[in-house]
Image (cartoon, rainbow, N blue to C red):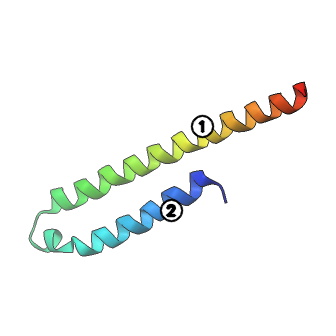
Amino acid sequence: MKRSVVIPLILLGYLGVMSYLGRGEFFAGNYLFYFGIIGATLVIIWLLHINLKMREKKREERDSDSNQAG
């Protein structure tokens, strides 16, 4: 599996655990805080995924160019 998939999956699992541990905020009525943190974290994980995919694509292009030149 590629790193652009594995790392975000691990972080999603971590987010799930942290969401479960932070459910006290939800039950206390702090809905905006609870879901805001989850939403912001999902956006960051998504941006990380996109960044890692772009880096992998550039690396593959660089490797294929070096293989053709050599």
Quadrant of res 60: top right
Judging by the rendered image, the residue that carries numbered circle 1 is 54
Q: Is residue 27 above or below residue 50?
A: below
In this rendering, would 40 be left or right of 66? left
Identified by mark 1, the residue type is: Met
The residue at 34%/72% (across/down) is: 17
Answer with mark 2 or mark 1, whichever residue precedes in sequence. Answer: 2
**Which numbered tag is attached to residue 9?**
2
In this rendering, would 24 be left or right of 50? left
Quadrant of res 26: bottom left
* Residue 24 in the image, given as x and y percentages of width and height: 15, 74
Name the secondary structure under disc 1.
helix
* Residue 10 in the image, given as x and y percentages of width and height: 48, 64
Quadrant of res 64: top right
Q: Is residue 52 above or below residue 33?
A: above
Q: Nearer the viewer, residue 43 or 59?
A: 59
